[in-house]
Amino acid sequence: MYAIDLEGKNALVFGVANQRSIGWHIAQALDGAGARVALSYLNERIRPGVERLAARLSTAPALIECDVSDDDSLERAFEETASTLGGLDVIVHSIAFANREDLGGAFIDTPREGFRLALDISAYSLVSVAKRAAPLMRNGGSIVTMTFQASSRVFPGYNVMGTAKAALENEVRQLAWDLGRDGIRINAVSAGPVDTLSSRVISGYRDMKRAHAERSPMGRNITHEEVANTALFLCSDMSSGITGEIVHVDTGYHVMGI
Ligand code: NAD
């Protein structure tokens, strides 16, 4: 039997804001595979929308508020996770943030505070989440984060978020080493452009999308479901030998030289 079966597994998904969120699509895939899913959301403002989404899952999920820029909020979130779920098998980290004005214009103009904010929320948060999740992953586990190819190539407008993704991908490799002997794997999905609240803020997003559709080997853009299915694979034992990896779900755009 080769189907992905996450029956009996507990998953905590960070980064659900609305129905377009990649985190939401991954949550649905995990739910469909039988995992017990908890959803983490940023703040009270977002909660009503997340509650409506949560009602679509097969079992009522725990809803856990967490602002990853605040250590107290992180502590509370993981205390709540431990008391509601007990242990954890899967973490999905689908979080990024930068000031809108730093996602356009020239990268050279990025101010110190905008740089600090983007790197803190979009990159450091993976370290702080992994550190708190690992003790709850008593039988090993899988952590999946979301990245973009601007980590290593220039996408004008993506600016400081490219720097954050470079840091994030480096963290994936270092955390793979830190956690590997405990049976905890960590990988990133490098997704091509998909329409979400965050992506639409990036000046140049439309150009990125057009370039992927025109120039990728498959000649089209990716779907939310393709990203979610790959994340599901990485969360499951089907990927038991993979850690520290960046898996591209971009219809092959990253292999092109023109
Ligand atoms: P999204 O806006 O739906 O998700 C971003 C999430 O980050 C939101 O849920 C938001 O509430 C959360 N967040 C922001 N600041 C936070 C904080 N301080 N604490 C906790 N949560 C916080 O957009 P998305 O496109 O689904 O983004 C999810 C991930 O996917 C991001 O890492 C993004 O960079 C990555 N990604 C997106 C694309 C794309 O084209 N949409 C492509 C590649 C990678």
Image (tube, rainbow, N blue to C red):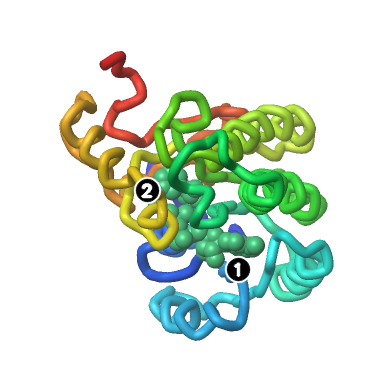
Amino acid tagged 1: Ser
For ligand 1, tell me if the residue under mark 1 lies within 8 Å: yes
Residue 228 at x, y = what percent? 39, 50
Query: Nearer the N terminus, badge 2 or badge 1?
Result: 1
Viewer-nearest of discs 2 and 1: 2
Residue 16 at x, y = what percent? 50, 66
Task: Give me the residue at 55% from left, 28% from top.
Answer: 245
Graded by Cα atoms within 10 Å as few (under 14), some (14 to 19) or many (20 or more), the crowding at tag 1 reads many
Graded by Cα atoms within 10 Å as few (under 14), some (14 to 19) or many (20 or more), the crowding at tag 2 reads some
Quarter of image, res 52? bottom left
Give the labeled residue for mark 1: 40
Separation of residues labelled 2 and 1 (CA atoms): 28 Å
Residues under numbered marks 2 and 1 in contact, where contact means CB atoms less than 8 Å apart: no
Residue 36 at x, y = what percent? 55, 66
Q: Is residue 133 visible?
A: yes
Q: Which of 138 and 67 lies nearest the eye of the viewer?
A: 67
